[in-house]
Image (cartoon, grey):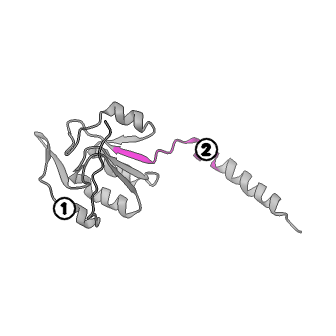
């Protein structure tokens, strides 16, 4: 029996459409934005929650406690760090793993991974400038881009 390629394509397409329908209907949010109350940016102003939600309405916002789990989610494709050079030191292993798996990174307003932050009983604290983390990622070039007026 000879099967035409059009018929075969129709069967495969229909199978995909009907079996993937529920999956396609689910919201897949590939963007994860690190957002933590009480943390301020290094090197630049901190965008407000409202600004980030307007710019990235489909994004999932994650505190330091939630970040590791969201970066481990296979649907996550982009990590946005809106605090300039600052990033949560406790989440470094999850961030590094995410980037090693091919995840993308957008850092707003600073040199990526040069100002680790940590939290204790008195709040958030920023460590001194360092290159320990960027060396693991082989980041050795940095170009400052002027902001808009």
Give the total of numbered labels: 2
Q: In this figure, which residue is indicated by the disc labeled 2?
A: 22
> Magenta segment, which residues?
20-33
Q: Residue at x 22, y 61 (%)?
A: 133
Q: Tell whether 8 sits left or right of 127.
A: right
Give coordinates of residue 38: x percent, y percent: 20, 36
Q: Check residue 27 for magenta coloring.
A: yes
Q: Measuring from the top left, give residue 90's x and y in whole percent.
A: 22, 53
Task: Between residue 65 and residue 145, name the one nearer to us.
Answer: 145
Where is residue 52? Give x, y as percent. 36, 36
Please give left or right for residue 38 compared with residue 10 in the image. left
Residue displayed at 25% across by 38% down: 46
Circle number at residue 26: none
Q: Which residue is mark 1?
A: 131
Q: Quadrant of the C terminus?
A: top left
109 or 17: nearer the viewer: 109
């Amino acid at each position: 029996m000879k099967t035409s390629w059009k018929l075969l394509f129709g069967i495969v397409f229909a199978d995909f459409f009907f079996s993937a329908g529920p999956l396609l209907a689910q919201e897949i949010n590939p963007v994860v934005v690190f957002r933590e109350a009480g943390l301020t940016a290094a090197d630049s102003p901190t965008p407000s929650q409202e600004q980030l939600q307007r710019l990235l309405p489909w994004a999932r916002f994650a505190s330091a406690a939630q970040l590791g789990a969201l970066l481990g989610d296979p649907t996550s494709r982009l990590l946005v760090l809106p605090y300039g050079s600052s990033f949560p030191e406790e989440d470094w292993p999850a961030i590094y793993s995410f980037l090693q798996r091919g995840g993308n990174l957008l850092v707003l307003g600073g040199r990526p991974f040069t100002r680790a932050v940590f939290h204790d009983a008195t709040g958030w604290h920023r460590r001194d400038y360092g290159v320990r983390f960027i060396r693991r990622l082989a980041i050795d070039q940095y170009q400052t881009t002027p902001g808009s007026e």
